[in-house]
Image: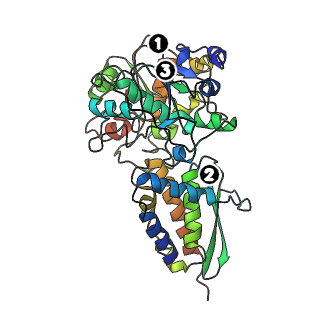
C-alpha cells in the first residue's frame, strides 16, 4: 500500500464514532470534483458500480494519475472513495499501488455495507490496481 | 391535499399506501407524521435528507446482529421509541434505489403490525430531481413509549417449508431476480458477489418478473395500476384470488414486489420468502428448475 493511502486510513481511524466518521467521509465526498474529461466507455467503466463510476489514468511522477468520474449524483460513497483513491494512489510507485488490499473498503466504510455496495467500491480499488499493473514502471 | 389526486389517478387498490413528494413537503412539521429514510448507501442520509426525517438503517436497525433473522419485539419497541413513533403515528418511508430499501423497511415494520405506513412515491430520486430541500440537521424528538405485539411471521413472511407446500398446492411463486439468475446462468445478481448459493435456477413453478419492472426509471415512481396489472396479471398469470409468495436472493428485492402486489394491486394473500435463493439454492434435495 502507498504511504499516502496508509496515512489517510490512519486519519480516518481516528474517527472512532460512527457518526463522526460518516461526516468525515461526506466531507471527502463533497470535495470530489467530477472529471468531465474521463471517457465514458465500457473500458473505463468500473464493473459492478451502480454509481456509474469511470476511471482513466495518465502518467504522473513515479506512477499514474487516477482520474475518476462519478455520474450518479446520489453516489456519495463512490465520490468519497474516488477522492481517497486519487489522493492516496496518484503519482505513487506502481508496485505499491498494486499491493493495495481490497478490504480497505471495509476499513473505510465499515462492515455494514450491503453486498452490492461493497462490491462496487471494491471494484474501484481492483480497477485502479489493474491499471497500475498494466502500466510499465518508468524510470 | 397536494398530490392525493395524482396518486388516486394511478388506480391503486390501496391508494393511501403511497404519498407524493408534494404531500410530504406539506407534512414536514406534522407531529402525527414521521418521515423515515432507509437507504443502501450508508452516507446518503447524513449527506442530506428531507428536513425532519429520521434514518432507519437496514443492517443496524432491522436485522438481528447474530442470527439470520429480523429484530425482535423489544428491539422494535426500542427503535420506535428512538425515532419517536407511537402506534398512531403515520410513517412515510423513502430512500435510494427506487425505494428498494424503503419497501424492505416497511415490510419489516408490517411484521410488527405498524400498518399506518406509506411509501413516498419516487423516493429520494424524485425529491432531489424536483429540487426540494435537503437538510443535514439530525432531528431530535422526545422518545416515545411504544408497545408492539410479538413479530408476526405468518401473515406476510414465508419460510422454506411453506414454500415447499406452496409448490405442491398450486400456489403462485414470483421470482423477482434477473432473468440470468432465474435461468440459472448466474447464481447472484449481475455484478453482485456470489453469496454462496451452490445451485442456480429457480423454485419450480415460479414466474420471473424482475422487481424494477414496477418502476419508472426516470423518476423512481411506481407504474400505474393498469401497467402493473399488465405485467403481473396478463403477462405473468398472477391473480388476486391465489396465494402468492415472492422471493429473490435474500428477500430485499422481493419486499419491493410484495409491496406492489399487496398494496398497489391489492392481493390479499402475498408473502415474502426472505430465505430466498441463498437458502433454497443450498438446500439439500430441494427441487429446482432451470
Q: Which residue is more in the foreground, A131 or B120?
A: B120
| Colour mode of the rendering | rainbow
Q: Is B75 left, or right, of A71 in this rendering?
A: left
Residue B148's quadrant in the figure? top left
Residue that numbered label 2 is attached to: A52
Q: In front: mark 3 or mark 1?
A: 3
Q: Is residue B199 left or right of residue B217?
A: left
Q: Which residue is mark 1?
A: B240
Q: Position of residue B161 (x, y in %)?
A: 26, 27
* Residue occupying the point 59% across, 17% down: B225
Q: Nearer the viewer, residue B241 or A82?
A: A82
Local SS, label 3: helix
- Where in the figure is residue B61, as x and y percent of width and height? 37, 39
Disc 2 residue crowd, few under 14, some 14–19, many 20+, Cα 10 Å: some
Q: CA distance from mark 1 to mark 2?
A: 38 Å
Residue, far front: B142
Q: Is residue B192 depicted above or below B283 in this figure?
A: below
Query: Residue, x 40% and y 49% (percent of image)?
Result: A112
Q: Is residue B249 placed above or below A39 in the rendered structure?
A: above
Amino acid at each position: 500500500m502507498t504511504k499516502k493511502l496508509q496515512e489517510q486510513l490512519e486519519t480516518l481511524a481516528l474517527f472512532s464514532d460512527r457518526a463522526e466518521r460518516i461526516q468525515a467521509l461526506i466531507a471527502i465526498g463533497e470535495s470530489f470534483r467530477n472529471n468531465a474529461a474521463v471517457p465514458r466507455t465500457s473500458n473505463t467503466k468500473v464493473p459492478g458500480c451502480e454509481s456509474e463510476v469511470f476511471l482513466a489514468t495518465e502518467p504522473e511522477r513515479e506512477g499514474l494519475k487516477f482520474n475518476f468520474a462519478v455520474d450518479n449524483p446520489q453516489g456519495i460513497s463512490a465520490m468519497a472513495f474516488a477522492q481517497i483513491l486519487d489522493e492516496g494512489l496518484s503519482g505513487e510507485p506502481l508496485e505499491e499501488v498494486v499491493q493495495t488490499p481490497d478490504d480497505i473498503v471495509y476499513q473505510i466504510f465499515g462492515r455494514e455495507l450491503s453486498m452490492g455496495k461493497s462490491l462496487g467500491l471494491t471494484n474501484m480499488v481492483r480497477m485502479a490496481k489493474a491499471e497500475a499493473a498494466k502500466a510499465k514502471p518508468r524510470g | 391535499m397536494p398530490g392525493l389526486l395524482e396518486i388516486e389517478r394511478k388506480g391503486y387498490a390501496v391508494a393511501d399506501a403511497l404519498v407524493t413528494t408534494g404531500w410530504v413537503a406539506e407534512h414536514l412539521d406534522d407531529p402525527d407524521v414521521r418521515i423515515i429514510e432507509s437507504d443502501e448507501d450508508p452516507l446518503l442520509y447524513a449527506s442530506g435528507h428531507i428536513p425532519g426525517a429520521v434514518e432507519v438503517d437496514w443492517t443496524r436497525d432491522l436485522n438481528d446482529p447474530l442470527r439470520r433473522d429480523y429484530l425482535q419485539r423489544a428491539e422494535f419497541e426500542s427503535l420506535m421509541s428512538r425515532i419517536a413513533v407511537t402506534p398512531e403515528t403515520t410513517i412515510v418511508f423513502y430512500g435510494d434505489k427506487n425505494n428498494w430499501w424503503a419497501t424492505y423497511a416497511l415490510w419489516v415494520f408490517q411484521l410488527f403490525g405498524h400498518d399506518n405506513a406509506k411509501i413516498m412515491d419516487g423516493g429520494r430520486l424524485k425529491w432531489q430531481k424536483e429540487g426540494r430541500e435537503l437538510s443535514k440537521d439530525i432531528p431530535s424528538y422526545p422518545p416515545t413509549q411504544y408497545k408492539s405485539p410479538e413479530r408476526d411471521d405468518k401473515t406476510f413472511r414465508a419460510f422454506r417449508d411453506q414454500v415447499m407446500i406452496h409448490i405442491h398446492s398450486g400456489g403462485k411463486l414470483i421470482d423477482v431476480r434477473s432473468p440470468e439468475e432465474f435461468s440459472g446462468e448466474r447464481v447472484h445478481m449481475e455484478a453482485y458477489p456470489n453469496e454462496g448459493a451452490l445451485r442456480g435456477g429457480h423454485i419450480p413453478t415460479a414466474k420471473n418478473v424482475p422487481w424494477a419492472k414496477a418502476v419508472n426509471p426516470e423518476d423512481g415512481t411506481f407504474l400505474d395500476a393498469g401497467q402493473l396489472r399488465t405485467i403481473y396479471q396478463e403477462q405473468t398469470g398472477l391473480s388476486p384470488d391465489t396465494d402468492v409468495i415472492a422471493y429473490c436472493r435474500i428477500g430485499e428485492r422481493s419486499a419491493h414486489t410484495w409491496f406492489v402486489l399487496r398494496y398497489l394491486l391489492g392481493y390479499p394473500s402475498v408473502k415474502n420468502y426472505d430465505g430466498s435463493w441463498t437458502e433454497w439454492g443450498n438446500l439439500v434435495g430441494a427441487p429446482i428448475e432451470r
